[in-house]
Amino acid sequence: MNAPFFKYGMFGDNVGLVMAFVIGIGFGFFLERAGFGNGKKLAMQFYFRDMTVLKVMFTAIVTAMLGVYYLSVFGVLDLSMVYLVPTNILPQVAGGLILGFGFVIGGYCPGTSCVSAATGKFDGMIYLMGVVVGIFVFGEMYPLVGNFYNATPMGQITVAEWANIPYGILVFAVVLMALGGFAASEWAEKINAGKEGSVITKRTEA
Amino acid sequence: MSEENKNLTAEKPYWNPYISGVGLGLVLLLAFVIMGRGLGASGAFSSLVVTVENAVAPAHVQANEHLAGYFEGGANPMKDWLVFEVIGVITGGFISGILAGRVKKGIYRGPNFSDKKRLIFAFAGGALMGFGAKLARGCTSGQALTGGALLNLGSWAFMLCVFAGAYALAYFLRRQWT
């Protein structure tokens, strides 16, 4: 079996769009299951009261990372054919910070606001309108920001290549980091138990 | 509504985050294996914006290098992977919400914040997010999640900055949430 299937020509563009819809359903389903349609729950991450964002995100990253790694080790998946977004480090750092501001101000990111809007929440719907306006403004400002957008190009590059660490070692390090993050998250939630918005609603006497 | 009916329409609890995370990770892995690309969200809205702009002011779009790029070689930006994926996300979120009794009108906010102010903040946050996602070439889905799993250098730098930015500003927004 050769993967990625699409890149090996197992099906064409139109079937690919059907796949996109089906995979999207799975994505939206698990986002909603995790509670990511709830902007307050998402924001509580940034007050250390509900660490679900970090737990779900890093469990997902570790799951997919290990899957990709082992499938490529066993020769099922050709990792070089999986699309890597090229790195432009400065605009990505700046964009990340702006996104972080938007996250705690608005309570969502684009994907989670779709789920919030789909479950009838007005803050999610209004947030999405904001996203559309922000994207429009960027496009209109492109003559001004285009140079910065294309600054500091580094091409398609992984952390392993950049730091000159074997890929497998880095995979292992990310797993350890995630486990550490989960332990810290559980601890933080216990410390903040009983506060407004905390995932642990009652403080238990130790 | 009687007590019994209330219970029937009560919201079910969210799933354990580690179980949801494994589910999300498997969906992402499936996207890698089937399509050779990851998930995304903001890109679909970029397609939507340029399509509307092109319908209203095509000459204006052609004069803008970035916007014109979406139509290169006669491409239709709506016939795009991310557009169909996001339609799926909305569908999947709705299905999950219905099954859990969570599809209800409402606004999420802290107890000491007005609905009107919350909606203004939601709009402002969304606008920042839209702009930032363009600058960073992706959002939490396309960069942090997808690029995170592929150990993409720019994605990891991006992800750390998202958390740094949100934590840096959280104190000033505590009245909205707590």
Image (spheres, grey):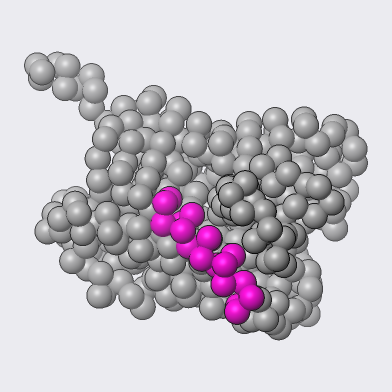
Magenta range is A128-145
Q: Position of residue B159 (x, y in %)?
A: 54, 68
Looking at the image, residue A166 lies above or below residue A182? below
Which quadrant does the C terminus of chain B fall into? bottom left
The residue under the point 36% across, 35% down is A119
> Residue A11 lies in what quarter of the image?
top right
Q: Position of residue B131 (x, y in %)?
A: 51, 66
The residue under the point 66% across, 42% down is B78
- Residue A26 appears in the picture as rendered: no
Q: Is residue A142 inside the magenta stretch?
A: yes
The residue under the point 42% across, 75% down is B165
Which residue extends farthest left? B2
Which quadrant does the N terminus of chain B fall into? top left
Q: Position of residue A48 (x, y in %)?
A: 31, 65
Left/right placement of residue B23 relative to residue B113 reads right
Looking at the image, residue A178 lies above or below residue A89? above
Left/right placement of residue A111 relative to residue B82 reads left
The residue under the point 35% across, 63% down is B124
